[in-house]
Image (tube, rainbow, N blue to C red):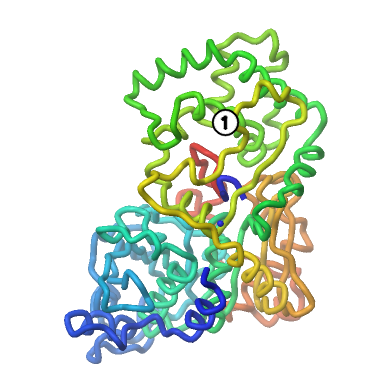
Amino acid sequence: MRKALRWLLALTVLIGTLSTAGAATAAPELSASLEQGGPPSPEVTTGTTGTTGTTTQDIKDRLLAIQGMSLIEEKPYTGYRFFVLGYTQPIDHRHPSRGTFQQRITVLHKDTARPTVFYTGGYNVSTTPSRREPTQIVDGNQVSMEYRFFTPSRPEPADWSKLDIWQAASDQHRIFEALKPIYHQRWISTGGSKGGMTATYYERFYPRDMDGVVAYVAPNDVVNDEDSAYDRFFRNVGTKECRDKLDAVQREALVRRKPLEKKYAQYAADNGYTFTTIGSLDKAYEAVVLDYVWGFWQYSLLADCATIPADAPHATDDAIWDSVDTISGFSAYTDQGLETYTPYYYQAGTQLGAPTIHFPYIEKKLIRYGYQPPRNFVPRSIPMTFQRSAMRDVDTWVAHHAHHMLYVYGQNDPWGAERFRLGRGARDAYVFTAPGLNHGANVAGLVPDEKALATARILRWAGVASAAVQADPSAARPLAGFDARLDRRDTEREPALRP
């Protein structure tokens, strides 16, 4: 993973799997909020409610009756209720008495008689109503979680040692326990990229919570120091003509380092950008340029090769700059660009891992730093130690225990070069690849037979597959119509290469 870019796992896994992630051992001042953080208060009925139910209590009142839940805002959307909420979580799920923080979640409420999709992107949560593909397929509710340590869901002061995949999975587990008495039908977890990784880790540590998992374009960097799969990918992706154009622009940006860094310095001065974390403008410049080819394939399609300068050696400086800036983003490795994503780079450098690729078409003298490690993108005041067993544990678990899990990858997405694979122990689990697609690959982009099968399995896992679909997967269709404003189909472009 790049800028996928990677515990204590034997003991962590044992404790994490058995933990209820509640707070039965909380100190007196926290026991009221943490011990009761799951079910709603006794006076709240847990029968069917919503647009078709029989309980008259408003859904907002039911949500706010959960101990530790608070309303940030409600936004209208036709056919739904959309809530932005704060939920009190332990900083450390192993020691709930040692402090709490407020975690943002959102609820797109349709009807408690419908299934619920639990979504996380692995970063900040969007406070704009949106519906992910599985939510449209099952015509259900959607709960979305902001990943811990992404502001404002960050403890103060921040103990970075409490940012790991088990703690984050325990956040999800505790939210699920809190909401399950209200949304009592089946649950499906989902996420794209780092969110797909997050959905996988949640299933690994709490395999009894969800009825199914749909993970999109989820990287799986099992051995951090062995990244040859990425080099093979870049030797074959797309067409030779497109690869040659991209390689030439990337190389030319390094050949013209001096004049383009002068332009970069002016750009930084004009925007108030600084380079303390990465160490220098020169390091930042090279990092952006080396992201260029990866960034193109992550977010673009083969047809977009037409936008790449065709004759790089004779292109103007502005043409080279504009192409690199459009794809990689010259703000990405400034202090201001890195700050929001410190939690990601911390995880990449402690558990998730980060890819390193080579550039055989560029002379060694032109490359000063190569792919830089996550440590270079995190302030030095934050200690980091890499835990080599973390991804191996998850990979082994998926291979042998995956059940009701679906992975979707894009054929031309670099992050899929190292992916999750299923072993003999997997049951009712699938890995599909969408032809020609990038980091925005989805079920809708699969070939017809796989699209039908994936849709049918999601409907079945959610408990809403008709008899016709159960008898013949080719009959499977999303239960809700496509809404261009509500439904997210493409990956959200990041200003740097992160999963």
In the image, is residue 492 above or below residue 244?
Answer: below
Query: In this orientation, which residue lies closer to the viewer: 406 or 266?
Result: 266
In the image, is residue 152 above or below residue 17?
Answer: above
Query: In this orientation, which residue lies closer to the viewer: 394 or 297?
Result: 394
Q: Position of residue 201 (x, y in %)?
A: 55, 69
- Is 464 left, or right, of 163 in this rendering? right
Q: Residue furthest bottom?
A: 42
User: Tag 1: residue type?
Assistant: Ile
Q: Residue at 69% of width from left, 72% of height from top?
A: 396
Residue 481 seen in the figure = no
Q: Residue at 65% of width from left, 67% of height from top?
A: 392
Q: Position of residue 296 (x, y in %)?
A: 64, 34
Q: Residues within 10 Å of mark 1 (few under 14, many from 20)?
A: many
Number of numbered labels in the structure image: 1
Q: Quadrant of residue 73?
A: bottom left
Q: Position of residue 475 (x, y in %)?
A: 72, 70
Secondary structure beneath disc 1?
helix
Q: Quadrant of residue 173?
A: bottom left
Q: Position of residue 270 (x, y in %)?
A: 34, 18
- Is 134 left, or right, of 252 in this rendering? left
Q: Quadrant of residue 308?
A: top right
Residue under label 1: 327
Q: Residue at 36% of width from left, 27% of height from top?
A: 273
Q: Residue at 55% of width from left, 45% of height from top?
A: 3
Residue 355 seen in the figure = yes
- Is 338 left, or right, of 464 in this rendering? left
